[in-house]
Amino acid sequence: MQVVDYELFAVPPRWLLLKLETDEGIVGWGEPIVQGRLETVRTAVSSLIEEHLLTENPLRPEYHWRKLYQSAYFRGGPVLMSALSGIDQALWDINGRYHDVPVHQLLGGHVRDRMLVHKYLSGESAEKLADEAIQAREQGYRAFKTNLPGEVAPLATPDRLNRVTNQISAIRDIIGEDALLGFDFHGRISKPMARALLKQLEPYNLAFVDQPLLPEHTETFKSLGDQTTIPIATGERLYSRYDFKDLLVDDAVSIIQPDVSHVGGITEMRKLASMAEAFDVAVVPHCPLGPIALAASLQVGFCSQNVVLQEQDLDVHDPDSSQWLEYLNEPGVFEFENGYIERLTGPGLGIDVDEDFVREKAKGRVNWYSPVWHHEDGSLAEW
């Protein structure tokens, strides 16, 4: 069997989808994307496939991963690793379909029957967040995450930090103590303010705090974690197991959050989960993306003991109304019950992409960029 062709589709809201074709008619799908750099990643995917994958046997994903990564003297980073991620997902999808088994079966078999998923809560006020939490609890979710709203000055006032704790307090009151609650700093806050805010958040029994500092400052994570009882997490802006290595060796984090569309795909995420397991570090994969990325991420989670919670932003509780699950022929494939997604059992990634719908949505222009924020004094703020 050989890889003979590929197509890339830019579709709303900000996704890039890859279709990889073989001469035996087996097709694999992947989701290579850096949000806000879609066209750059498109070029990288085309370059990697045309230089290294066309006419090759797709049933060697480990070899192809090494070749796509190692063939470049300058390697790694968000663009190249995200391009590699989508290709790797598509290769594993082909492998599973060829052998007529889900990908997790090829990776050692499942260690769990279902995966707990969390619901993202958004809002600029405590009241809005509380309303969303009530609705999400009624929909069956048992795990939640929200993020730091708006920019935060390098030296923030007590009132600004108190607004955050009031929002967390409102959510905790609604969801109760029998639910998980994570909080994403999103790298928006300076080191002194991160320490102050972590102290204020301790009474609310958070499951984790995500990206309390920017990924440029990973050397500070250990000292920050030593000063709080809240588990520290990071990883959505790290791009291979090599980027995570020092965090694990230094005992700097309790949870890592790799993204299967940025960290090198299924091949690398599986290795990273195994590496983290040796340090008793849990994995909560980042995935605010489409159904292909979610399916790929879940395939790793179903066969990895320390993957304990999965991000999703697709309204899996109501597939008939979810505009993002319309990209699938069977929107209800992510069977949701009591806060969990049941194990995918179909071949490959376990989903079937509605190619006609993808082609129709790809006719429009997708042009999403990260917002640019400023502080009151006109200086740039972190988004």
Image: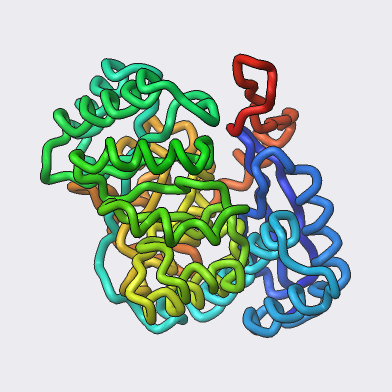
Query: In the picture, which quadrant includes the N terminus?
Result: bottom right
Above or below, 345 against 340 in this view is below
Residue 48 rendering spot, x and y as whole percentages = 81, 66
Above or below, 206 against 12 in this view is below
Q: Residue at x 26, y 70 (%)?
A: 112
Q: Please identify the quarter of the rendering in which residue 85 is found.
A: bottom right
Query: In the picture, which quadrant includes the C terminus?
Result: top right
Residue 298 rendering spot, x and y as whole percentages = 41, 61
- Does the image show residue 354? yes
Residue in the foreground of this view, choosing between 224 and 337: 224
How many badges with numbers are in the image? 0
**Figure coloring:** rainbow
Above or below, 267 against 221 in this view is below
Question: Is residue 323 rendered to the left or right of residue 227?
Answer: right
Question: Is residue 135 rendered to the left or right of residue 240?
Answer: left
Q: Residue at x 84, y 73 (%)?
A: 72
- Does the image show residue 351? no
Q: Residue at x 67, y 69 (%)?
A: 25
